[in-house]
Image (spheres, rainbow, N blue to C red):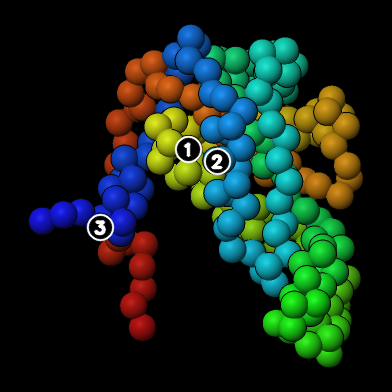
Amino acid sequence: MATTIADDLLTLMGERTSVRHYDKSESISKEDLTDILESAVKAPSAWNLQHWNFLVFHSAESKERLLPIAYSQNQIVESSAVVAILGDLEANKNTDQVYNPLVDAGYMSKEIKETLAGQINGAYTNPVYARDAAYSNASLAAMQLMLAAKAKGFDTCAIGGFNGEELIKEFKVSERYVPVMLISIGKAAKPAHKSDRINLDQLSVWL
């Protein structure tokens, strides 16, 4: 029986692992990296505000600068690239950019756009909501990035071990953004550590 796109996707999700040792001789082209990021930005987001921004560490020099910030983890410099996922704390400022083209094309009325803008700006008066939304929505793009990389034959690892304050300082990240995670990308030098998953019965409640 021929496999379907759905079968291929499920296989891809099952084969994705967290790789921490990369073949330093392998590189990733700017074109492939751009394709991966283009897939990442198709992730869903609340109000379609697209709460993400990317710092792309593609050169050897930039990865060396990142290395001490990521506590000298070798995967930073062994990988072909590293992407810092940043969450947007002021994603409400994207409202016009997101909705005006829909209004201009006749897909949304100006009144509905203004209603949505009011709801969005109201939510963003709460800094806790803004921070939670930055993390949760940027993480959706991060997962999509890792699956896209796997589809193009690259391995990845999501990295939470880094100094966010130093990242902001060293690379002059705007206060609008909060560092969420780093993702290393490359070709595995050896397989990922064996791991297992908690049984679904322990993780789900059916109502």
Q: Residues within 10 Å of mark 1 (few under 14, many from 20)?
A: many
User: Do the residues bearing badges 2 and 3 touch, measured as CB atoms within 8 Å?
Assistant: no
Q: Nearer the viewer, residue 146 or 181?
A: 146
Pick the residue in front: 110 or 59.
110
Residue corresponding to mark 3: 4
Amino acid carrying mark 3 in the image: Thr
How many neighbours does mark 2 have within 10 angstroms: few (below 14), some (14-19), or many (20 or more)?
many
Q: Mark 2 is on which residue type?
A: Ile
Which residue is painted at 43% across and 36% down in the image?
152
Tag shown at residue 149? 1
At 77% from the left and 67% from the top, the residue drawn is 98
Along the line of sight, the residue nearer the viewer: 185 or 159: 185
Q: Quadrant of residue 72?
A: top right
Q: Earlier in the sequence, mark 3 or mark 1?
A: 3
Residues at marks 2 and 1, CA–CA distance in whole angstroms: 6 Å
Most extreme residue toward the left is 1
106 lies above or below 157 = below
Percent coordinates x, y for residue 112 in the rendering:
78, 88
Instruction: Identify the residue shown where x is 64% and y is 33%.
Output: 83
Is 140 situated left or right of 19 in this image?
Answer: right
**Please, what is the three-letter code of the amino acid marked with disc 1?**
Ala
Residue 6, relative to residue 27: is it above or below? below
Asked whether the beta carbons under mark 2 and mark 1 sit within 8 Å of each other, the answer is yes
Residue at disc 2, secondary structure: helix
Q: Which residue is mark 2?
A: 36
Query: Quadrant location of residue 181?
Result: top right
SS label for mark 1: helix
Quarter holding the C terminus is: bottom left
